[in-house]
Amino acid sequence: MWTRRKRTQPLLGGLVLMAGPLVLVLVLVVGWFVGFGKFDDRQAVAPQPPTGNPIPEFSLPPLTTGDPGLAARDLRGKVAVVNFWASWCVPCREEMPLLRDLAATPGVVVYGINSDDRLPAAQRFLTAVGDPFDRIGVDADGTVARAWGAYGLPATFVITAEGRVAHALVGPLDRRVVEDEILPLIAELSQEP
């Protein structure tokens, strides 16, 4: 009579089969992070919008009722910084102290464009982190951000008095960028006739 024999695998072989996918995932994750570590300059990782272009025409409603909102015409006649941000954006929260310091610098005007966000969340965000902006426009569907080339948040632009993009950074600001790039550029542009 034939009896069915129960097939068993050695314990070690079963563990290897179970651990194999986990080890593969760990190797891929570590490789991914190590690969990003090779880039010292965030611009090497993410392409930046071109500079020298005129800013797109736009007119945005305000974040808070009674405030003026923001339009392209507001950015002409003086050197300005424009920052695209949202309440759900973690790097936006992290760079707010730098934006507050930048806005406190004599001669520096910082405007904000809240993009792809909900008004109550954006208002709570600024109450919690502090509001560095002279004016804020609301880009509810992200159309203006895309027109500027801000395909990710945060994004910061330095605008000439003639309304042209002099500097563009998609990604979070850091102190080195503010001190070595943005402030010297603002000083240089502010002295031009």
Image: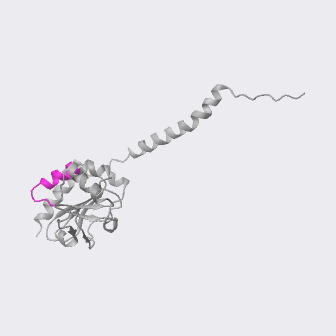
- Where on the picture, by quarter, is residue 182? bottom left
Q: Is residue 106 left or right of residue 51?
A: left
Any magenta on residue 64?
no
| Picture residue at 11% right of the left edge, 54% below the top | 105
Name the quadrant of the N terminus. top right
- In the displayed structure, 124 sits above or below 51; it is above
Render colour scheme: one colour
Residue 113 point in image, percent of width and height: 25, 62
Residue 147 point in image, percent of width and height: 33, 69
| Picture residue at 20% right of the left edge, 48% below the top | 97
Task: Give the magenta-colored segment's residue range.
Answer: 96-109
Q: In the displayed image of the protein, which residue is found farthest to the right?
A: 1
Q: Is residue 134 left or right of residue 125?
A: left
- Where on the picture, by quarter, is residue 84? bottom left
- Where on the picture, by quarter, is residue 169? bottom left
Any magenta on residue 98?
yes
Residue 185 point in image, percent of width and height: 18, 59
Q: In the displayed image of the protein, which residue is found farthest to the top?
A: 11
- In the displayed structure, 3 sits above or below 44; it is above
Q: Is residue 44 left or right of residue 120?
A: right
| Picture residue at 36% right of the left edge, 59% below the top | 47
